Image (cartoon, grey):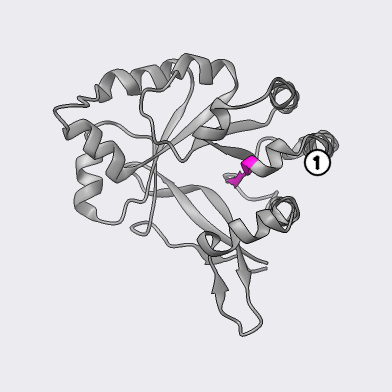
Amino acid sequence: IDFYTQPIVSLPQRKRRHFECFSRIRAADNSLVMPDRYVAIAERAGLIAAIDNMLLFRCVQLVRRTRHQNPPTGLFINISGHTLADQRFFRQFVQFMGANRDLAPRLVFEFAQAHVAGHADAVRLELERLARLGFRFSLDQVSDLNIDVDGLGLRHFRFIKIEAARLIEAIRSPDLRLNMPALKAAFDRNGIDLIVEKIEHEQTLVELLEFNIDFGQGFLFGEPRVARE
């Protein structure tokens, strides 16, 4: 399992403030196996929790190695729906983070919008425990822009990621008519920073900067790279 990171930059300054962490499977012939090929297989084999665990371990290692970095950067790590559904594993995960609560300022846990909507009560309780330890959450894979921003704020979400193409389409569409200033004001009111991801071209960035977005991510600022010592 290879460990990749991709920068998340502040806007409009383009300074690297955070990194998202990814896992990639390296095959015997040294080729990379991307998530769209291995996730379904790993789920059937019961290996998703192991992959998530390995990614978390590598993130913890990276935080430890860069703990004296100034200014400190945050690491975003995705927690899969499969891991959330495994109550025993997720409880152990929360216990592990409780023993390493000094990492809280540097680690941000990401959850897909679809999985957040379906959180069971047991999962909500464990997330509340994580939040009390000081860990922050990010909403990812946003497909529905009709977002309960106040509800996310109460549940300790401090970041939300929206794809650039989806956001621009919603703003331009006469059917959707997304009120971007009102949405951004709701984010600000709840202490939630907006990260627009998959920004690949300067023209896209110019269009987005009009809306005072907080952070950007995408090939324009840096592609995912293998994390080295």
Q: Position of residue 229 (x, y in %)?
A: 67, 68
Q: Position of residue 98 (x, y in %)?
A: 82, 33
Q: Which residues are magenta?
A: 75-81
Q: Residue at x 48, y 14 (%)?
A: 150
Which kind of residue does numbered mark 1 sit on?
A: Phe
Q: Residue at x 53, y 28 (%)?
A: 158
In the displayed structure, 170 sits above or below 223; it is above
Q: Position of residue 139 (x, y in %)?
A: 51, 34
Residue 136 lies left or right of residue 191; in this view the side is right
Residue hosting label 1: 89
Image quarter where the N terminus lies is bottom right
Q: Residue at x 31, y 44 (%)?
A: 164
Residue 226 lies left or right of residue 174; in this view the side is right
Residue situated in front as seen by the camera: 228 or 94: 94
In the displayed structure, 57 sits above or below 128; it is below
In the displayed structure, 52 sits above or below 180; it is below
In the displayed structure, 53 sits above or below 132; it is below
Q: Quadrant of residue 58?
A: bottom right
Label 1: how many residues lie within 10 Å, few (<14), some (14-19) or many (20+)?
A: some
Residue 16 lies left or right of residue 177; in this view the side is right
Q: How many marks?
A: 1
Q: Residue at x 48, y 53 (%)?
A: 7
